[in-house]
Image (tube, rainbow, N blue to C red):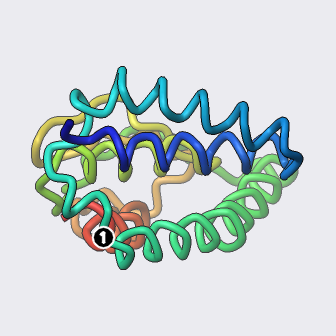
Amino acid sequence: MRGVLPTALMAFLTYIVFTGSLTSYDLATGAVVAVVVGLLMGPHTVRDDSKALNPIRWLWMAVYFLWYMLVAETKSHIDVIIRTLTGNYRPGIVRVPIDVSTDYARTLVANSITNTPGTVVVDMDERYVYVNWIDIATRDPEEARKEISADFEKFARKIFE
C-alpha cells in the first residue's frame, strides 16, 4: 500500500522525539501508533514512496530542522525582542513571491514563515504568500522574498521537490 511505510516511519520518529524516551514501552507504543497512522493516512498523504523514502531527503529534513530551530528562530526571537523593547517597528502586509512548485513545499514555506516570530502568512496562492511583517524593510516583492522566504524555499526544494 502506497505511503504506509514512509508515513509510519515519520510518525514513529515524531512519537519518539516528542516522548523523549527509548524505553521498551515507548518503543512498542510508538510502533503501534505509527502502524495505525501509516495505514490510515499513508495512502492519502504520500504520492510516491521512492521519493518519500529517499534518505537524502530525510537528511535534508534533519538539517533543515536543526537550522530552523538553532538559527532562524534565534535570529527572529532576538529581532522581535529588540523591536518590542525599542518600539522600532513598522508593521504591514507584503506580497512575497514563492518559487516552489509542490503543495508540500509551499506548505513548509508558509508554515516556516508563520512559525518564525515577526511574520505571519495571512493568505497564499500558487505564486505568492501575503505576509504580515512586524517591520517592513522593503515593499519590493523580490527583496522581501530574500528577507523572508528565500532560505525556507531552498530547504523546501531539497526536501519536497
**Which quadrant does the C terminus fall into?**
bottom left
- The structure residue drawn at horizontal position 28% and vertical position 57%, both measured from the top left corner, is 52
Instruction: Look at the picture and state if 136 lies above or below 120.
Output: below
Nearer to me, 29 or 127? 29
Residue receiving disc 1: 54
Instruction: Look at the picture and state if 20 lies above or below 66.
Output: above
Residue 43 occupies quadrant: top left
Nearer to me, 11 or 96? 11
* Image side of residue 49 versus residue 64, left or right: left
**Which quadrant does the N terminus fall into?**
top left
* Place of residue 72 in the rendered image (x, y in percent of width and height, measured from the top left): 61, 67
* Place of residue 92 in the rendered image (x, y in percent of width and height, measured from the top left): 44, 39
Instruction: Look at the picture and state if 5 lies above or below 152.
Output: above
* Place of residue 131 in the rendered image (x, y in percent of width and height, measured from the top left): 38, 42
* Place of residue 86 in the rendered image (x, y in percent of width and height, measured from the top left): 83, 54
Nearer to me, 114 or 19? 19
For the residue labelled by badge 1, is the local secondary structure a helix, a strand or a loop? loop
Q: Give the residue type that dot 1 points to.
A: Asn
- The structure residue drawn at horizontal position 66% and vertical position 73%, both measured from the top left corner, is 71
- The structure residue drawn at horizontal position 46% and vertical position 41%, both measured from the top left corner, is 8
The 10 Å Cα crowd at callout 1, few under 14, some 14 to 19, many 20 or more, is few
